[in-house]
Amino acid sequence: MTTRTFATLTGLEIISSDAYKIGDLVDIRYDTKWKVIGLTTKTDKNLAKKIDSIGSGRSLIRIEPKKFIINDVILMAESTSEIGPMITVDSENAESLSHLTGKKVVSEEGIILGTVYDVNVDTDLWTVPTISVKLEKIAFEPLGLKKGLFSKTVISIRTEYIESTGELISLNQKIEDMREEIVVE
């Protein structure tokens, strides 16, 4: 499993195997089972002309996730002539990772644990296994943690514990049930 944070993926160039820049990663769309369904990028006019399926230039498109090589760019195995079936016009009908960052996370009993600091993406399976949460002071004692002097404490919470996402991210777990599984980053 290769896990990368959403923050480190955002802004990376997506490049086809024939060295065309598809665009920069703007967002990542996921479904209700936390499976990534697309990488959102903004295209340019030259690419739009080359690939008929993506409409006009400067459109937001969604690229189906595949096995990519990810370093300082996201390199696709497909050439521009092969990526047409992998691309759809992006729409707001799917959830996006960018909307999770900064949301408060609340336990089943209503205790605010903290704020989503980042989201972790498994780029081998293209799933979202965990979110990183910067803890609030009130959450340390119930979680059995001690507050550090100089740094903010960030923990990982598995996405299977998320009941719903809206104004807040509500968990389906009580704090006492999560104590043994908390991973401090």
Image (cartoon, rainbow, N blue to C red):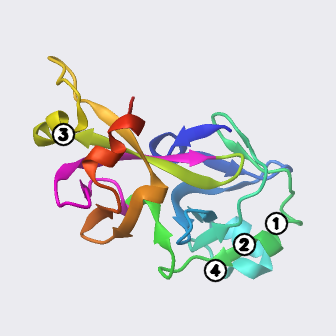
48 left or right of 117 in image: right
Closer to the N terminus: mark 4 or mark 2?
Answer: 4
At numbered mark 1, what does the secondary structure look like: helix, strand or loop? loop
In the rendered structure, find residue 56 and report the number of the disc placed on it.
Answer: 4
In contact (CB < 8 Å): disc 1 and disc 3 = no
Tag 2: Cα neighbours inside 10 Å, few (<14), some, or many (≥20)? Answer: some
The residue pinned by badge 3 equals 142
At numbered mark 4, what does the secondary structure look like: helix, strand or loop? loop
Furthest residue to the front? Answer: 177
| Gap between marks 2 and 1 measured at Cα | 7 Å
Residue in the foreground of this view, choosing between 180 and 10: 180
Closer to the N terminus: mark 2 or mark 3?
Answer: 2
Residue in the foreground of this view, choosing between 138 and 128: 138
Residue 11 in view here: no
Q: Which residues are magenta?
A: 99-122
| Gap between marks 1 and 3 measured at Cα | 49 Å
Q: What kind of residue is marked 4?
A: Ser
The residue pinned by badge 1 equals 83
Q: What kind of residue is marked 2?
A: Ile
Q: Residue at x 56, y 48 (%)?
A: 121
In contact (CB < 8 Å): disc 2 and disc 1 = yes
In the rendered structure, find residue 87 and report the number of the disc placed on it.
Answer: 2
Residue 70 image point, x, y percent? 69, 39
At numbered mark 3, what does the secondary structure look like: helix, strand or loop? helix
Q: Quadrant of the C terminus?
A: top left
Q: Residue at x 66, y 54 (%)?
A: 126
Residue 166 in view here: yes
> Does residue 106 show up magenta in the picture?
yes
| Gap between marks 2 and 3 measured at Cα | 46 Å
| Gap between marks 4 and 2 measured at Cα | 13 Å
